[in-house]
Image: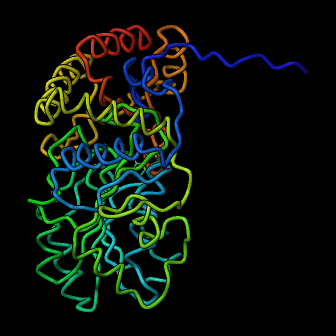
Amino acid sequence: MTVSSFVPPVRTLMGPGPSDVHPRILSALARPTIGHLDPLFVAMMDEMKVLLQYAFKTQNQLTIPVSAPGSAGMETCFANLVEPGDKVIVCQNGVFGGRMKENVERTGGVAVMVEDAWGAAVDPDKLRDALKANPDAKIVAFVHAETSTGASSDAKLLCEIAREHECLSIVDAVTSLGGTPLEVDAWGIDAIYSGTQKCLSCTPGLSPVSFSDKAIEKVKGRKQKVQSWFLDLNLVMGYWGGEGKRTYHHTAPVNALYGLHEALVMLQEEGLENSWARHAANHKALRAGIEAMGLSFVVKEKDRLPQLNSVTIPEGVDEAKVRSTLLNKFNLEIGAGLGALAGKVWRIGLMGASATPHNVDLCIGALREALG
Ligand SMILES: Cc1ncc(COP(=O)(O)O)c(C=O)c1O
């Protein structure tokens, strides 16, 4: 069989990620590959750290992209910070909190679950109660922006509660970074991971992470080696580390990093706060259109993420047929429900370059036509 080159169609991506990738980023990806220890590449890596510090609002030295998707950023946090026997309070209000539990258990820790309904924010009082009942807990972990439901949790308050109980915090910001307010230093977040394919509008496959000095202290003071060689920050720091000579750890995904660099340059040009405001404004416009069609949102207004809109599927509607009409007729992708919300909701993303008035109009018009 002779296989030809793969040429994908141009779609509008309004699902839960990836989002539309700006042509500037696509052309950055196509620039000539150079060696990953080339002095010019190393200088680009240094710029990347500064750009990521800007996006995360942090001065943390260890602020880098892990060379793998958001799930690897998640594993980096848990594999490095959880030691066998450590008790971790995991707040779960959707799919991704469940993955945190898996991570805790696979690293030999003990997960204590704090459960909230899918579509609700994490309840700070439940976290307080869990910490009172488990004074030996070492870490609190939660998802800032739950992509499976569209709910936002109060990361500032949850980290404050963790600190009051002398716990480190691990925060999933895969969907929040660049899209909604997030301040790593001001909120006292100890370890955070994100993804490139959501509000940064880059291609999937990299995971920006950031670690506070307190978190690094814990990693350096581990009694046992980190079980994962690839994700061991003690080794990764030798390649991405601040001072001195860079040593080979793995071959960095050179071109993918050009893409992320460009995405972050674009974020800096727009201004982080302006990007947050753009996501909020487009969400408002989408909400007006959704409500005018008589559809409703899963998440209460005060906890709703602008960049991920879970819309309840009306009774009697074949949800998969609507999505395939959007895809085939309008080249428009929206997301299906995940986990407990499978078959019950559509997830409409307004992330990064996808968060535009044009896309809002396209989506509302297409949905109106598909629903007849
Ligand atoms: C909240 C959240 N955490 C983690 C992940 C995993 O990221 P990735 O699919 O890039 O591995 C996702 C992906 O959608 C996510 O939305």
Number of dots carrying numbers: 0
Whether residue 135 is visible here, answered yes or no, is yes
User: 36 or 9: which is nearer to us?
Assistant: 36
The residue under the point 33% across, 71% down is 90
- Residue 78: horizontal and vertical position, in percent? 41, 70
Q: Is residue 13 left or right of residue 274?
A: right
Relative height, residue 332 to residue 246 (above, below): above
Residue 93 position within the rendered picture, expressed as x and y whole percent measured from the top left = 32, 58
Image side of residue 29 versus residue 186, left or right: right
User: Is residue 269 depicted above or below 97 in this figure?
Assistant: above
Residue at the spot 32% in from the left edge and 67% down from the top edge: 115
- Residue at 15% x, 25% y is 284
Residue at the limit of the structure toward the right, as seen here: 1
Query: Which residue is at 38% across, 28% downward?
Result: 314
How is the model colour-coded?
Answer: rainbow
Quadrant the N terminus occupies: top right
Q: Is residue 207 or residue 24 the one in the foreground?
A: 24
Q: Is residue 160 left or right of residue 28?
A: left
**How far across and how far down the image is residue 132, in percent?**
18, 87
Residue 149 coordinates in the image, percent (x, y): 34, 45
If the image is split into quadrants, where does the C terminus sit?
top left
Q: Is residue 116 visible?
A: no
Residue 62 quadrant? bottom left
Give the answer, above or below, for where 288 lies relative to 138. above
Towards the viewer: 163 or 233: 233
